[in-house]
Image (cartoon, rainbow, N blue to C red):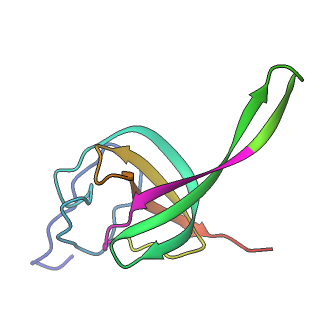
Amino acid sequence: MEKNQKKPKNIGLNVVHPKKDCNDKNCPFHSHQKIRGRLIKCRVIKTDPFKSATVTFNRIQPLKKYERYEKRTSKLHAHNPPCINAAAGDEVLIAETSPISKTKSFVIISIAGKVDEK
């Protein structure tokens, strides 16, 4: 770590801290943004230049009438800090925070790997 870099703060989760430094006010590692609520493992399907990413994940919904389950897909918008900088196709872990904008209440906290598209 260089002398100019700040040490990333402990966010209370067992995740690898990013090696890069950033001055983003919504980064949980380098600002006062707090993590609370849900943790979701999902896949990035789209990124945009305004530090946002669209992520998708599968969930199981029970059908009481038929005593079965169905798979549903949900889409969320998450903040993509410059110190993490996830790309489309990455498997990521997102965490809930206080609202960042009208549609963003989640932030990407780690990259788990690449997803093979088949």
Q: Which residue is located at x 29 percent, y 54 percent?
A: 101
Q: Residue 115, how many percent across, how many down? A: 67, 70
Is residue 53 within the magenta segment?
no
Residue 2 makes an appearance in the image = yes
Determine which quarter of the picture holds residue 9. bottom left
Q: State left or right for residue 108 relative to residue 68.
A: left
Q: Which residue is located at x 25 percent, y 58 percent?
A: 29
- Name the dominant secondary structure of the magenta segment: strand
**Front one among 102 and 12:** 102
Magenta extent: 72-83
Determine which quarter of the picture holds residue 60. top right
Furthest residue toward left: 4
- Examine the rendered structure and indicate whether residue 101 appears above or below residue 20: above
- Examine the rendered structure and indicate whether residue 78 appears above or below residue 82: above
Q: Residue 38, how many percent across, how many down? A: 45, 39
Q: Which residue is located at x 55 percent, y 75 percent?
A: 88
